[in-house]
Image: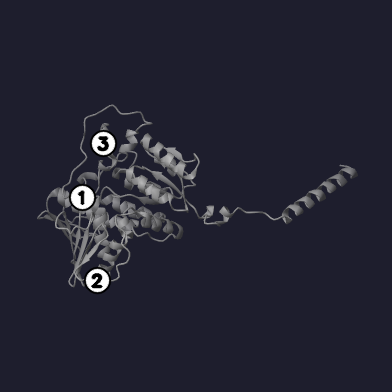
């Protein structure tokens, strides 16, 4: 290139450099929303959430999540077309756009790298498998209860969350409600004296399976994907009555519902009160219209339907050698001595999930353990499944929380797990 060309290029370079310097000298305005000002949450602080199986209970949970300013819900997966449509409309109305994506197969949602956490509120036949798949995909999980189908799946759930370091919260929201927390504190701090007995209310003291209904023509996949609806559960022909979601394979596996799903609340609270989040009762026996269990420390767990004070649904009672306390969903607390209630604090009736969901979101950010973490959930569910096995067999069984076996009891041991339908074997 000639001399004039070199001069021209040099002049262009100097002009461009001067323009760049002027641009750098000008102030750059960053929107306040990016910095998290004016009550907004910076994008870097938002938790990107997806939902899997959002029915009645899931819609309530999702409403709680959407009220949190640091959550952005971006996608829903459901095997039912009507639910996909309803959730998308709910979310899009909340954000004033049409961005919520929809999926039929949960594997497609879990493959999205932008999603940090998932809400799982499918039928119970899917809870454990979906949670494990989500952890393996690098997602934190809030899962409705009951969370597992059997003892083996309970152990697998705890193991995968320990190994992957993901955050897990079971939807046992009573661990975050003031009246239940206060009653548990009375038990754990010795104010009731030495614990003697813990009482839990089940859904029923009968076990049953979901059965096999007459075959009906299956609907189009876009309406209901029957194969994905069954998921890991044993195959059976389509029948619309099976689509009642929470009634399908409730509590799971070979022993039906029995002490689940209420047990996943009430037994869970008894486990917590006994400082037993890393163990389970060692003996279970159906007796006198009750299921009576015993921990290695001698504390009795009594699962019963009757004899409760009128304190609302999901009642628990803790008894020590110096006093007792009982509470339920109406948030009232009754104790043997009114002095035990002097510091009970705020009364919040019902069973809202807001506090529990906030605990989950905070732990997603801090990577701390949630109130209903995978290990606590594992052992509370093992207690329920072992109780169901005793009910199913109609006799006393002994359980070893270290080996996770019923020593010398092959009949009970066979009920610890079940075959999962392909390709959902984990």
Q: Quadrant of residue 26?
A: bottom right
The Cα–Cα distance between marks 2 and 1, rounded to whole angstroms, is 29 Å
List x then y, in percent, for residue 181: 30, 63
Which structural element holds mark 3?
helix
Q: Residues within 10 Å of mark 2 (few under 14, many from 20)?
A: some
Instruction: Identify the residue at image location x=32%, y=51%.
Output: 156
On screen, residue 261 versus residue 10, left or right, reads: left
Q: Is residue 107 visible?
A: no
List x then y, in percent, for residue 193: 21, 72
Observer-nearest residue: 189 or 209?
A: 189
Query: What numbered label is drawn on residue 340?
Result: 2
List x then y, in percent, for residue 306: 14, 55
For this orientation, the residue located farthest to the top is 217
Q: Which residue is mark 1?
A: 203
Observer-nearest residue: 345 or 215?
A: 345
On screen, residue 110 versus residue 409, left or right, reads: right
Query: What numbered label is drawn on residue 75?
Result: none
Marks 3 & 2, CB-CB < 8 Å contact: no
The Cα–Cα distance between marks 1 and 3, rounded to whole angstroms, is 20 Å
Instruction: Identify the residue at image location x=30%, y=28%.
Output: 218
Image quarter where the C terminus lies is: top left
Image quarter where the N terminus lies is: top right
Q: Residues within 10 Å of mark 1 (few under 14, many from 20)?
A: some
Q: Which of the marked residues, 2 or 1, is nearer the chain's N terminus?
A: 1
Query: What numbered label is drawn on residue 242?
Result: 3
Observer-nearest residue: 331 or 325?
A: 331
Which structural element holds mark 1?
loop
Instruction: Identify the residue at image location x=39%, y=58%.
Output: 359
Q: Is residue 66 visible?
A: yes
Residue 381 versus residue 248 in the image, above or below: below
């Amino acid at each position: 290139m000639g001399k004039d060309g070199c001069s021209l290029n040099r002049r262009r370079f100097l002009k461009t450099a001067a323009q760049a310097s002027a641009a750098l000298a000008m102030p750059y305005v960053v929107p306040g929303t990016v910095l998290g000002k004016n009550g907004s949450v910076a994008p870097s602080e938002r938790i990107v959430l997806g939902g899997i199986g959002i029915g009645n209970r899931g819609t309530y949970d999702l409403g709680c999540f959407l009220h949190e300013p640091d959550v952005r819900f971006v996608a829903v997966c459901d095997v039912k077309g009507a639910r996909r449509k309803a959730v998308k409309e709910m979310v899009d109305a909340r954000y004033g756009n049409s961005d919520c994506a929809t999926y039929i197969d949960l594997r497609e949602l879990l493959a999205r790298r932008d999603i940090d956490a998932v809400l799982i509120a499918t039928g119970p036949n899917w809870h454990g498998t979906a949670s494990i798949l989500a952890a393996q995909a690098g997602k934190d999980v809030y899962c409705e209860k009951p969370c597992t189908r059997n003892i083996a799946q309970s152990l697998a759930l705890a193991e995968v969350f320990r190994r992957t370091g993901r955050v897990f919260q079971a939807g046992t929201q009573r661990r975050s409600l003031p009246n239940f927390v206060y009653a548990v504190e009375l038990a754990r701090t010795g104010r009731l004296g030495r614990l003697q007995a813990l009482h839990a209310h089940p859904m029923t003291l009968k076990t049953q399976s979901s059965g096999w209904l007459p075959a009906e023509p299956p609907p189009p996949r876009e309406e209901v994907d029957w194969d994905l609806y069954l998921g890991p559960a044993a195959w059976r022909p389509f029948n619309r009555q099976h689509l009642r979601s929470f009634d399908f394979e409730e509590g799971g596996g070979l022993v039906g519902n029995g002490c689940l799903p209420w047990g996943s609340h009430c037994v869970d609270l008894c486990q917590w009160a006994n400082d037993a989040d890393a163990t389970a009762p060692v003996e279970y026996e159906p007796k006198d219209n009750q299921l009576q269990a015993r921990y290695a420390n001698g504390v009795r767990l009594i699962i019963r339907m009757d004899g409760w004070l009128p304190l609302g649904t999901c009642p628990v009672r803790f008894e020590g050698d110096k006093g007792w306390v009982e509470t339920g969903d109406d948030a009232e607390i009754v104790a043997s001595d009114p002095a035990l209630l002097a510091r009970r604090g705020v009364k919040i009736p019902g069973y809202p999930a807001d506090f529990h969901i906030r605990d989950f979101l905070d732990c997603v950010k801090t990577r701390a353990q949630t109130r209903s973490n995978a290990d606590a959930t594992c052992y509370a569910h093992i207690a329920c499944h072992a109780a169901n096995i005793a009910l199913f067999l109609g006799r006393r069984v002994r359980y070893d929380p270290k080996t996770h076996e019923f020593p010398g009891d092959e009949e009970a041991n066979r009920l610890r797990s079940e075959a999962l339908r392909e390709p959902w074997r984990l």
